[in-house]
Every structure is written in C-alpha cells, then in structure tokens.
Amino acid sequence: MTRVRRSPLALLSCTLIAGCGLIPTPSVALKDARLDLPSSGALSGKVVYLVRDSLAGSSVPAALQQITLRGAATYRTGGLGTLRAVELYVRLPATCTSFAATPTAPGMVVCDAAGEAAQAIGPLNLTAGQGAPFTLGGAALDTAAKAGHGFFGLRFSDGQSVFGDTLDLTGLKASARL
C-alpha cells in the first residue's frame, strides 16, 4: 500500500485557512422581500423596523459566519416620494416604541438611531423604479440569520418616502464563510 506524504506546510495552510473563516460556502437563494414604507418626513434620526419577519425560516448553521446578503433594491413610488438612500438594519424583534398598522401607515417599531448602530448592515442607494445592486453584512445579520428571524429597519438618509411607497429586495442570495 502506498502512503501519500503531505507536506507539513500544506497541512498547516489548510488548518489556518479553515480557522480564519476563509472557506466560502455556496450562495443560497432567499425569498424576495417587499418593505411597505411609511411617510418618512417625521422620522429623522430614527430607525424604523417593519413588523414583518423578512428572514422567517431562513436559518443557517451556527458554525457559519460573515454572512453576506446580495441582491437588487428597487424603490417604487406613486410619484411623490424622493427617496435616494437608506441605511438598512436588521434585528430580532425590537423593544422600542411600537405603532400598530393604520390605514395610512404600516405597523412599525421606531428606535433612536443612536442606539441602533450595532444593528446596521449596510447602505442602499436608490433610484425610483430601477434596481440597484447591494451587498449587506455584519454581526447583526449573522445573528438574525442564525436565529431564522430578522426584521428589517430603515434609517432614511437622503430624500423622503410617502405612504404607499415600497422597497423591493429581489434576487436575494446569502453566502457565508466557514
């Protein structure tokens, strides 16, 4: 029987690569998400979490880390909205101020942006009616994906949305590192 000798350097390299989280996993497709936007005029300095669990049932194994979410974001307005940029956040259910859905606003939880920095997962630059590619990631996305639940939140940073506007996140693919 022939024995294959492996170089100690090759074995050490494989161990280091695995230990540093450098082994990417294949991308997995996720369901598209539609976020019904509130009128953002009075929400400056706030993060608005929508009461729809956009990551429900999309859990990943605990061994995975550095989860990345890619896709396209399309802002849709009836013509009065001017939204051009938002910061996206994700968390498990928030305990800030809750507002039930009304005929003129979606159900939402509103938090002060200063206390939500750890929940930020990335910016979205928007042009009404056009899909814009994005890549999101961070510790909050790792936590939400491992829990199989995630409520998206928005901080409106450029322009304003009006009630009836939506933000569609399509072609969603998640990847991670082992």
Image (tube, rainbow, N blue to C red):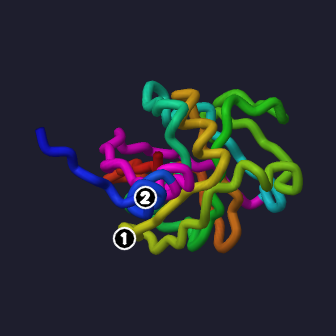
* Of residues 90 and 132, the one drawn nearer to the viewer in this rendering: 90
- Within 10 angstroms of label 2, few (less than 14), some, or many (20 or more) residues? few
- Which residues are drawn in magenta? 16-41
Q: Which residue is mark 2?
A: 8
Front residue of 161/51: it is 51
Question: Mark 2 is on which residue type?
Answer: Pro
Predominant SS of the magenta segment: loop
Question: Is residue 4 positioned above or below 60 on the image?
Answer: below
Q: Is residue 38 left or right of residue 167?
A: right
Residue 12: x, y in percent? Answer: 48, 57
Q: Which residue is mark 1?
A: 130
Question: Which residue is found at the position 32% from the left and 49% from the top?
Answer: 27
Q: Position of residue 82 (x, y in %)?
A: 57, 71
Quarter occupied by residue 110: top right
Residue farthest front in this picture: 1
User: Residue 3 vs residue 155: left or right?
Assistant: left
In the rendered view, does 35 fall on the left or right side of 110? left
Can you tell which of label 1 and label 2 is closer to the viewer? 2
Q: Is residue 15 visible?
A: yes
Q: Is residue 5 magenta?
A: no
Q: Looking at the picture, how far across and down is residue 1, in whole percent?
A: 11, 38
Q: CA distance from mark 1 to mark 2?
A: 52 Å
Q: Residue at x 58, y 28 (%)?
A: 147
- Disc 2 on helix, strand or loop? helix
In the rendered structure, does residue 25 fall within the stretch colored magenta? yes
Give the structural element (helix, strand or loop) at label 1: loop
For marks 1 and 2, the one nearer the N-term is 2
